[in-house]
Image (cartoon, rainbow, N blue to C red):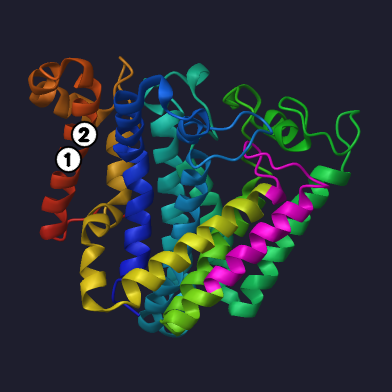
């Protein structure tokens, strides 16, 4: 159980590769090579969907990050259980609370203006790391007291509860079942409890913790299945479960719209279904196809094993709007990329991503990982 699973690290690395520059490189390459001839539907996959719009590939990056957090939890919790003895839950609870607190603070540092030290400019809930913290807390409580069946029940409870709250609970003189950007029960709860600390976007966080918990638990269930029995059969089960979630989302959309901003139950089933399909694919290739396939996962594992560090380096921005990593790499590669003229942006992004991978490879080689 303590051995790292190639598919989980590789899928985490794939997600971070997209987020930390891979998607930007691909988009810039399409713009440079095809220009205006690039299909509009393809270019839209590199941007977030508008409210109620079609779910894009870029919209999957955040839920996949949450899902993969859950997929690794059964392995970590098995280690806690083995080493913790009769009081393992007490030690685990401390680890969970510490991790939740650190993720919450890091989330404020990335997008909540914590570093500016001006309370009036800070946002309380505003970042993927805080969504992970919420989902991780819910999933951890379930894992400490429930087996696989209990986890499946917990997913259903989270999804049904959130669906019922959005569909049937009136609020502040408004009727139930509104799904407008500035008028729905989830965003109302955020405004009510956060006040001036709400980030001013249509994204919801507090009530939506139920959705984040469901996504994390979906990952936990997949991780538990992989831990119990690796092989083509498990990959098939994951694929079937993912397809069932996608079908359920299509059916539920007749009742509840797929809105990523507030992670409606439809959005959770849709994004969770795709996460399971990807998990099945990565497990089938990297865990089940022999030593060569496992070694092929190495470039993604390098990123996946230090995903949090990669995220912080590329997502924490300075006063001029550039990331920390941009500040490190720009002086080194500006001269080279400028010589590329029309392809300057593409060359700059590609070299920056390459340097990030080399830096993470150096840390990987020396087994230096950023943990919370």
Left or right for 255, reference 244: right
Q: Residue at point 41% right, 82% down?
A: 231
- Residue 107 in picture, x, y percent from top left: 44, 38
Pick the front one: 76 or 255: 255
On the image, the x and y values in percent for residue 163 come to 78, 51
Q: Which residue is mark 1?
A: 354
Q: Position of residue 246 (x, y in %)?
A: 65, 58
335 lies left or right of 190: left
Locate residue 48 relative to residue 4 in the image: left or right: right
Q: What residue sits 15% from the left and 28% below the top?
A: 329
Q: Residue at x 53, y 46 (%)?
A: 131
Residue 350: image tag: 2
- The N terminus lies in quadrant: bottom left
Give the CA separation, mark 2 to mark 1: 6 Å
Q: Is residue 336 above or below residue 105?
A: above
Work out which residue is located at the far front of the displayed protein and give it: 37
**Over which residues does the magenta segment extend?**
238-266
């Amino acid at each position: 159980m303590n051995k790292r699973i190639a598919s989980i690290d590789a899928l985490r690395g794939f997600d971070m590769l997209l987020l930390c520059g891979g998607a930007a490189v691909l988009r810039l390459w399409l713009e440079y090579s095809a220009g205006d001839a690039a299909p509009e539907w393809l270019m839209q996959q590199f941007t977030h969907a508008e409210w109620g719009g079609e779910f894009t590939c870029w919209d999957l990056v955040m839920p996949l990050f949450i899902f993969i957090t859950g997929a690794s939890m059964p392995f970590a919790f098995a280690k806690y259980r083995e080493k913790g003895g009769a009081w393992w839950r007490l030690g685990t609870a401390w680890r969970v609370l510490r991790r939740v607190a650190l993720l919450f603070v890091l989330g404020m540092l990335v997008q909540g203006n914590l570093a500016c030290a001006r309370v009036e400019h800070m946002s309380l809930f505003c970042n993927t790391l805080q969504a992970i913290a919420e989902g991780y807390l819910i999933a951890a409580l379930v894992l400490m007291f429930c087996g696989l069946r209990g986890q499946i029940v917990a997913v259903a409870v989270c999804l049904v509860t959130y669906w019922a709250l959005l569909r049937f609970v009136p609020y502040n003189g408004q009727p139930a079942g509104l799904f407008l950007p500035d008028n729905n029960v989830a965003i109302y709860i955020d405004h009510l409890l956060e006040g001036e600390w709400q980030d001013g976007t249509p994204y919801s966080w507090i009530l939506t913790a139920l959705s984040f918990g469901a996504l994390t638990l979906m990952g936990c269930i997949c991780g538990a299945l992989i831990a119990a029995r690796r092989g083509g059969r498990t990959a098939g089960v994951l694929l079937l479960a993912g397809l069932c979630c996608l079908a359920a989302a299509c059916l539920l959309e007749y009742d509840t719209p797929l809105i990523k901003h507030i992670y409606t139950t439809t959005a959770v089933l849709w994004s969770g279904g795709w996460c399971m399909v990807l998990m099945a694919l990565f497990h089938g290739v990297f865990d089940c196809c022999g030593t060569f396939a496992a070694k092929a996962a190495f470039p993604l594992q390098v990123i996946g094993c230090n995903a949090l560090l990669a995220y912080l380096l590329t997502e924490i921005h300075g006063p001029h709007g550039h990331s920390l990593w941009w500040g490190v790499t720009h002086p080194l590669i500006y001269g080279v990329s400028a010589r590329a003229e029309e392809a300057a942006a593409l060359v700059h992004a590609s070299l920056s991503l390459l340097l990030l991978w080399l830096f993470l490879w150096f840390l990987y080689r020396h087994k230096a990982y950023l943990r919370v």
